Each structure stands twice: as structure tokens, then as C-alpha cells.
Amino acid sequence: MRLKNIPGSRETIAASELVIHEAEKLKGGWSEEFGRKAPLAIEIGMGKGRFLMGMAEQNPGIDYVGIEKYSSVLLRAIQKLEAQPKENVRLIRMDAEYITEVFAPGEVDIIYLNFSDPWPKDRHAKRRLPSRQFLARYDQFLKEGGRIEFKTDNRELFDFAVEEVAESVFKIKEITYDLHNDSVMNQGNIMTEYEERFSAEGNPICKYILERK
Ligand code: SAM
């Protein structure tokens, strides 16, 4: 998702208290930032934030950090959060490539990847957020017993993601190729912006949940 550049979005983000500006400084200190010891969940490539806000509302006992690369997209999430403030949500504008600089070993309980960009060219495979390279990064800060949840309607990307798990320290705990018709995995499902759009077009949604081997 890349919205047209919105004039002033960088300035608005710089001035926003909902955005963490030097996130590396919080590495190992996220519980102090939230002012409590609670499970920490992150969404990487959060887009406009519908899923993150919905999860934060559904689970007030969990703290959430949303990560988004583009200012123009993050701006929409900021506007949403300003309209309905939530104490258990913080936002970061960054490229997830540097994510290990922001979270310390064992600091994160759950990682959500939703409708990640497919990067269809083979030479860009390592940029895909469920690639083996990213799984190795997630391993560095995911808690013992933590999990990774990924959903997408893109079957090619999902098949790639499933293959990549074998090259990582993780294993598949649960998997479905039609989330909305899976009564167990769909329980409590909060739809993302993309999920709403693509499922309305009739595309089945794939999802896996990973845990360590
Ligand atoms: N998760 C949202 C949803 O399901 O509606 C948005 C999906 S959109 C296809 C993918 C989002 O991930 C975009 O907003 C994009 O800017 C963001 N993104 C892609 N690569 C990223 C990266 N390396 N770091 C942070 N955000 C990234």
C-alpha cells in the first residue's frame, strides 16, 4: 500500500505523540514505555491500522506496536488513533529490515504479518516479510513460546511462506487455506483493510500460526 504523498505528513508524524521517534532507544524498555508489564504484540506493515486498533480494543491487557514504512500510510493510522485514543497502542515509522534494533531478545510475544507485500520477482524474495531472512530476525526478539501469525489472500506468497518455515527455527502450529470458513481459526478474527477488500471479491484468505520447533 502506498498512498499518494500527502503534503505535511512527515511534519504531522514528527509532531505526533502517538509515534515513537527514536524507537531504538526503547529496545528492552517497552514495558516502561507502556507503564506496565503486559504481553507485547507487534504488527509489521500495519497499513492504516484497522487490525491493530481492533485488536487493541478487543485485548486491553495486551500492548500493541504498529510498524509501517510509509509516512502517507502511517498518517491514516495516526488520524484513526487520534479519533479513538488507546493507551495500549504505539506506532513506529520504519523499514522492518532494521527491526532487531528496536526489540530486545524475548521482548515480543506475538508478531502479526497481514497481507504483506508479495515482491513477486525472485531476486526480491528476501524482502518478503515471511521470508527465511525475516523469520531469522523475528527469532532474535520473539519470546520463548511466542508466535507469528500471517494471513494473506495471495496464494503464491502463502505457498512461499509455508516453504520458508522449513528453513527456519519455527514450525507450523495451525494453518488454513480458507480462514473465513474455518470456524476454529476464524474465532475472534479482526479483518484488515486488505482482507475486507479481497474477501469481498471472493478470494479465500490463507493463514498460518508459527511457533518454535
Ligand atoms: N496490513 C495492512 C492490511 O492488511 O490491510 C496493509 C497491507 S499492505 C499490502 C502492506 C503494508 O506493509 C504497506 O502499508 C507497506 O507500506 C507496508 N510494508 C511493506 N514492507 C514493509 C517494511 N519492510 N517495513 C514496514 N512496513 C512495510
Image (cartoon, helix red, strand yellow):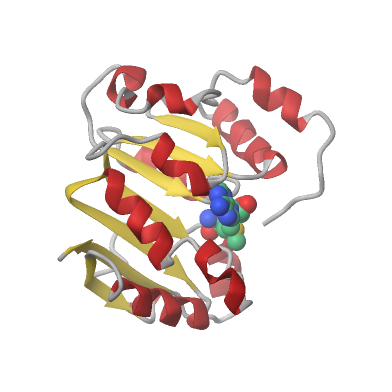
* Residue 149 falls in image quadrant: bottom left
Residue 188: % across, % down = 31, 57
Left or right for 201, reference 188: right
Residue 101: % across, % down = 42, 36
Q: Residue at x 58, y 78 (%)?
A: 122
**Res 193 seen here:** no
Q: Nearer the viewer, residue 11 or 77?
A: 11
Residue 45: % across, % down = 53, 51
Q: Quadrant of the N terminus?
A: bottom right
Compared to residue 30, the image places residue 156 above or below, namely below
Compared to residue 88, the image places residue 190 above or below, namely below
Q: Residue at x 32, y 70 (%)?
A: 208
Left or right for 37, reference 60: left
Return the residue found at the far front: 123
Compared to residue 143, the image places residue 202 above or below, namely below
Q: Nearer the viewer, residue 150 or 139?
A: 139
Q: How many marks?
A: 0
Residue 5: % across, % down = 81, 43
Left or right for 212, reference 49: left
Return the residue found at the far right: 7
Query: Where does ligand 1 appear, by image quarter?
Result: bottom right
* Residue 113 falls in image quadrant: bottom left
**Res 18 seen here:** yes
Q: Quadrant of the C terminus?
A: bottom left
Q: Nearer the viewer, residue 189 or 98?
A: 98
